Amino acid sequence: MQRLTRQSGRHLLRFNPLFSSRISRLQQSFYDPHQNWNRVRHHFAAVAAENPSKLSARHTLETGNYNNGAHGGRRCVSSSGGVPSSSSSSSNHPSTESSSGGFRTWYLRMLDKNPMSTKSVTAAIFFTTSDITAQGIDRWSAAKGEPRVDWDKGRTMRMLAVGLLMSGPSLHLWFNLMSRTFPNPDMWSTVKKVSLGQLVFGPCFNTIFFSVNGYAQGERGQQILDRLKRDLLPTWQHGLMFWPLLDFITFRYFPVRLQVLFNNCCSFVWTIYLTSMAGKSGVKPIQA
């Protein structure tokens, strides 16, 4: 019986030269560790297409596990259907790249995907946290005889809105503008960026901030102007003692996409002062 089977196999290879040549190339691929495995899959697909009886072998090959082999690329034939498999035991190792990312990788990816939205949400978190801290300091530093001041939720919501709708977008646009206007990271360009920040961006931001915050508290017209006369100049003067060095570090040593984040980290202390100034009651107009 075995002799008859071998003879019929020889007749099949003799009268089907195309099948014979592909089988021979396939055998060479099995024992050549440097052969491209994609060619092997192609040969199996072609043979299975011409011979439907080989379809099960094709399916096993396409769905089976195959590795090039970590130890010399050796290949062996499994007993489940003649599918080549690796002699190495290493297979289907989980990727360490996805597990080693964490929050930092996710945040950087969000900065690349949605830069303005990510920076706006970050600024809102810092403004909200700073206001809560400022109100806690005010309550803790109050004298014993004074009445206990409740948490002003409306003030915290205003600071959240300022960070989300004003601080984050404006800082994103400002830092991008400075990067395009002065693309060189040299000392002179950095000094220009810092100077423009203190002379242009700072006063404009503080003016809009105090005006919007006063309007949200019910102030109108002359009351807002009185608030600006009272708070704008002292805030700018105190900012000159706080921001130039931090802005220099920001422009000099941080890439553009991380400048807003570093600015928000530095502004945590500054925003406590800023929200305290904004939380003061408005100045009543002087009666003649």
Image (cartoon, rainbow, N blue to C red):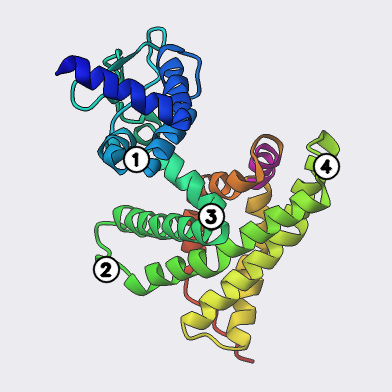
Of 99 and 61, the residue lying toward us: 61
Q: Position of residue 97 (x, y in %)?
A: 41, 32
| Distance Cα–Cα, label 1 vs label 3 | 50 Å
Q: Position of residue 60 (x, y in %)?
A: 27, 35
Q: For marks 4 and 2, give the CA distance.
A: 47 Å
Q: Which residue is mark 1?
A: 51
- Pointer 2: residues within 10 angstroms few (<14), some, or many (20+)? few
Query: Which stretch appears magenta?
Result: 243-251
**Numbered circle sitting on residue 157:** none
Q: Amino acid at mark 1?
A: Asn
Q: Nearer the viewer, residue 19 or 257?
A: 19
Residue at 25 percent of width and 57 percent of height: 144
- Mark 3 or mark 1, which is nearer the start of the sequence? 1
State the residue in front, 248 or 115: 115
Q: Amino acid at mark 3?
A: Lys
| Vertical position of residue 204 compared to residue 8: above or below | below
Residue 286 image point, x, y percent: 61, 85
Specify the label residue 150 is tagged with: 2
Label 3: which residue? 113
Q: Nearer the viewer, mark 2 or mark 1?
A: 1
